[in-house]
Image (spheres, coloured by chain):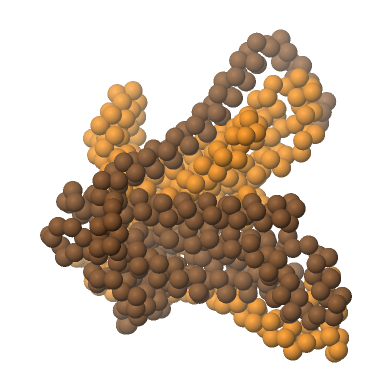
Chain colours: A brown, B orange
Amino acid sequence: MSDLALQARLEGKEGHLRRRRAVNVVMEAAATAGAVVAVGVLALVIGSVIVKGAGAFGLDLLIHSEVPFGEKGGGVANAIVGTGLLILLATAFAVPIGLLVALYTHEFAPPRIANGLRFVLDVLNGVPTIVTGILVFSLLVVGSGQTAYAGGIALAIIMLPIVARSAQEVLALVPRPIREGGLALGLPRWKVLLRIVLPGAAGGILTGVLLAVARVAGETAPLLFTCSVFAQGISINPGHAVASLPLRIFQLAEGNSPEEHNEAWAAALLLILFVLALNFVARYLYARTRSRVGL
Amino acid sequence: MSTKQLAPPWAPKLTARTSHLGDRLLQVLTLLGGIATAVVLVGVFYKVFDQASLAISRFGLAFIGRQEWNPVTGHFGAADFLFGTAVTSAFALLIAAPLSLAIALFLTELAPRPLQAPVGMLVELLAAIPSAVLGLWGIAVMGPVLARTIEPALRSVLGFMPLFSGPSSPAGLLPAALVLTIMTVPIVSTVTRELFASVPRELKEGALALGATRWEMVKLVILPYSRNGIVGAVLLGLGRALGEAIAVAMVVGHTPGIHASLFAPGDTLASRIASEYLGATTTLQISSLAYLAGILLVLAVLSNLVARTVAGAAAGVPGAVAR
């Protein structure tokens, strides 16, 4: 809109100055109310998880494993260990491939292919996680059964676009003179990339990885078909299905006894603390990297 | 393909002397990473539609409009679940879109500087709540409150509309829509906040200098300037809402059907797949569930692609890097 047209519209309204100011106040109040509602809902959810989870939360929950149905006691130690194993597996698959994709699109690929790969990553990021579960189920579980490998790969597929896209953004932030300096000193490109560019981007890449881990640590849907039928004890064998916190919460919430519900809330408290901690660490790292690069 | 062709313009030309074996190796290795990514994406589509092929050949496109799901007689149709997905997602975005715009405006135009970063971060943290936790909260805390106080209140005021009539239950379409609202608000508000922050300052100051109130400046400058981006942001949120399985499965009530009332229980594409896929007994049932997954996949990917096209590259992966 041209300034003249804008001015004309504003002048036409000048007679109603009081009304215009009143509308402004109402709209400002509405915008503020929107922010208050969003923060309020966050407080409400986290608050109820703390209040309802604190009762069953304690050392017993952390060091005991699941007990057979109907028995008292028990904890989520097996789910904690399982979630740890699944995250390790997912990170081991997703981070190297994500970094390679980011390096390829940013450093080697011709523009058209680089754009194509960004497109592929965006589409992959939009695939519903339950559908990712179906893919991994039909590839790795049919015939051979559920394993922690299958669950880890399902989570890795969700991590991959997050890791790759954030690594691309961070690679673009590494100042050009630094890599040019390396090249000018006669270093081959691969050394410049692996010894200068990647270490320079490490803080930002780590941020992306942590956020991706925070995202998949709470994922239930991709594990439902790939890693949900597990033994009650602690297992670190990636060849067997392992328990996980989000899946235990889902199962306990569907249960009927108050004990199960209490345990679900306690496990939810544990999971939410873990995920929030990861988010805070990631944000702190990102802020530090940014200030160091001088942005 | 020659190396010359592959190098970005600023890279030094790799002559025989400087072309290192290591360079070639790294290039091939990273290319393999790119190929692996593309293969995964193609694999998702191939595997889902391959599994669905039996149901597709048996029911054809009529599957989409058919309102039946009976594993015993082997009659399957997607209409009930499409309805549930459409109603919960649409209602979620109907609330989430204006709420997110309000949040974004508050953060970019109204919030005192020391409040901007922390409030923005708190809103983004809503996206960090795991879906199983949100589902647990939805069924144990929000559902009962809705059924006891809010739904009766809505019924007494708006009960003349079929949408707000009928008996209440803790699980149903309304709780599912509200859970989806909570999941989409951080996505939509984060993207729109970045859009609003990128509106050139001269335009905003120009409007204010001409005597516009702050709201008029928003209405006449900020909103028109970022219109495409807002549509893109809402579509990104839609993609997220369509595909959410666990949180919805916990609160939606597992009852396929098409009801006029938001208070009635229902079921969605994603939540039906989540609850039935592992326990499916016949190949036709598995294939029909894969058909549902195929429909869901196409809808979610389409809304992401349209979002990407409308908003340009601005959308990308929201929240991939905390900003």
Image-quadrant location for residue A293: bottom right
Image-quadrant location for residue A233: bottom left
The answer to which of B197 and A202 lies nearer the viewer is: A202
Q: In the image, what residue occupies the spot 68% across and 11% down?
A: A16
> Is there any visible trace of residue B57 in the rendered image?
no
Residue A23 at what x, y percent from top left?
A: 60, 18
Residue B112 to residue B121: above or below: above
Lateral position of residue B257 relative to residue B189, left or right: left
Lateral position of residue B237 relative to residue A182, left or right: left
Q: In the image, what residue occupies the spot 34% across and 78% down?
A: A237
Residue B295 to residue B42: above or below: above
Q: Residue furthest front?
A: A59
Q: In the image, what residue occupies the spot 68% across and 61% down?
A: A170
Quarter of the figure with the N terminus of chain A: top right
Residue A144 at what x, y percent from top left?
A: 32, 82
Q: Residue furthest left?
A: A70
Residue A176 at what x, y percent from top left?
A: 81, 65
Q: In the image, what residue occupies the spot 50% across and 75% down?
A: A93
Image-quadrant location for residue A244: bottom left
Residue A247 at what x, y percent from top left?
A: 32, 61
